[in-house]
Image: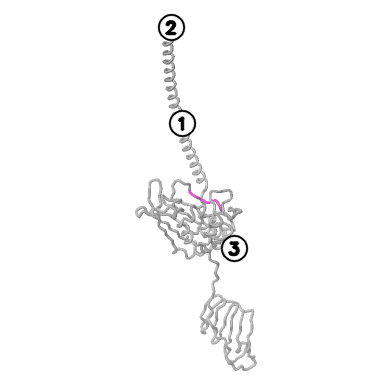
Amino acid sequence: MKATIRTPLAFLVLLLACDSAAEGNGKVEAKADAKADIQLDTKAVADAAAKARADADAKAELAAGAAAQVTVPPLKAVADVEAALGTKVALKPADLDLKGVVDLLAKGELKTAAELELFLNAPGGAAHRVDFDADGRLDYLQVVELRAGGDVNFELRAVPSSKLDASLAVLVATIGTVRAEAEGALKVVASYSAAVEGGADLEFERDFKAEFKADGVVLADAGAGAFFGWAVDVGRPAYVSAHVSPVDIQLGADGAAQFAGDVSASLAAARLAALRAAIKVEALALAAVDVPKVDVTPPKVDVKGAAKAKGGIDIDHSAKAESSVKVGSGGGVNVGSGGIKVGGSAGISVGGSAGVSVGGGGSGKGKAGAGFKIGK
């Protein structure tokens, strides 16, 4: 009986030992599998990170290559542009409100060069009145970025609407950044070019508190200086416009403006209207001549001989307008084109389109009697 009892007990113990060993082996295998899974996950993360870096590098190379392919045409001398167009270049500070543009950039209303170019040229309104080739149409203002060391300059170049040729562009103004590290500031200086008559003495400056680091410049007020914060970002490709006409800009059904086929920059209709409202675009003003007051009361004259006195007003359409101011030997004063001429000894003549002539002398022959003439 004892033998029959021991055999089942031994068998049970043996079974329990096998189960325990199997369970232990299972746990070891599970741990090994988990470790392998962790290793696989870590490798997958590393592979993904490496791929992301490779993609970023590839995109950077593509961007750099694209920027390198966009060449900046050198600016011709103004005299050469005039010879090519057959007309004199005419630019004045009032043609572009440079101060207003700088104010918009300083307030962060425009954030990139593409937005600036869209704003300056979008159809449906006007942000300038540059027409240096005098063909009655607004010229296109290109934004061209130039870098020199750590400084970044943006040239505003006008492309003649009569030619649409960037090689005939004329520099209107420059907006530049200067790193004033000793002062802890990024300085912005905007000025008109030498081609702008009377613009040499006009310059607009803004300062932004900034921290200069090895990998870039950090503005204290990133919101207000959004454009210039973007400008000094060393990691981005340089902006060089390839557009020469407003037809390169399309307006959506909602009035938003963007470059055709390019959704990287856009200005909503309401925003575009607000930007235009902040800029001064003056209408062309015609110069007026201040005509002095003249007493045209005819003097009393005793007419003798065969000459007949003309006592009325004679409208003379053959009188010619003069274009100068002259003091004659007989005491006359002549202001052309609507001015006044005092000729001879006592005569007064207003030339141009509304002139008045009072003939001199109290007697004699001929037609210069006592009348006064309004000549055309």
Q: Who's the residue at 40% across and 45% down the image?
A: 215
> Which of disc 1 and disc 2 is earlier in sequence?
2
What is the secondary structure assignment of the residue under circle 3? Answer: loop
Between the residue at mark 2 and the residue at mark 1, the CA separation in whole angstroms equals: 56 Å
Name the residue tied to disc 1. Answer: 41
Q: In percent of the image, x 42 and y 18: which residue is there?
A: 20
Give coordinates of residue 17: x percent, y percent. 41, 15
Magenta-colored stretch includes residue 107? no
Mark 2 and mark 1 in contact? Answer it, CB < 8 Å.
no
For the residue pair 5 and 35, the one nearer the viewer reads as 5
Tag 1, which secondary structure? helix
Q: Which residue is mark 3?
A: 136
Where is residue 167, by image quadrant? bottom right
Q: What colour scheme does the image use?
A: one colour
> x%, y% of residue 45?
46, 34
User: Which residues make up the magenta segment?
Assistant: 238-243
Q: Residues within 10 Å of mark 3 (few under 14, many from 20)?
A: few
Kindly report the distance in space between the C-alpha atoms of the residues bearing marks 2 and 3.
121 Å
Vertical relation: 297 (above or below) 183:
below
Mark 2 in CB contact with mark 3 (< 8 angstroms): no
Residue 230 at x, y percent in the picture:
46, 50
Q: Of circles 2 and 3, which is in front? A: 2
Residue labelled with disc 2: 4
Precedes in sequence: disc 2 or disc 3: 2
Amino acid under disc 1: Asp
Q: Quadrant of the C terminus?
A: bottom right
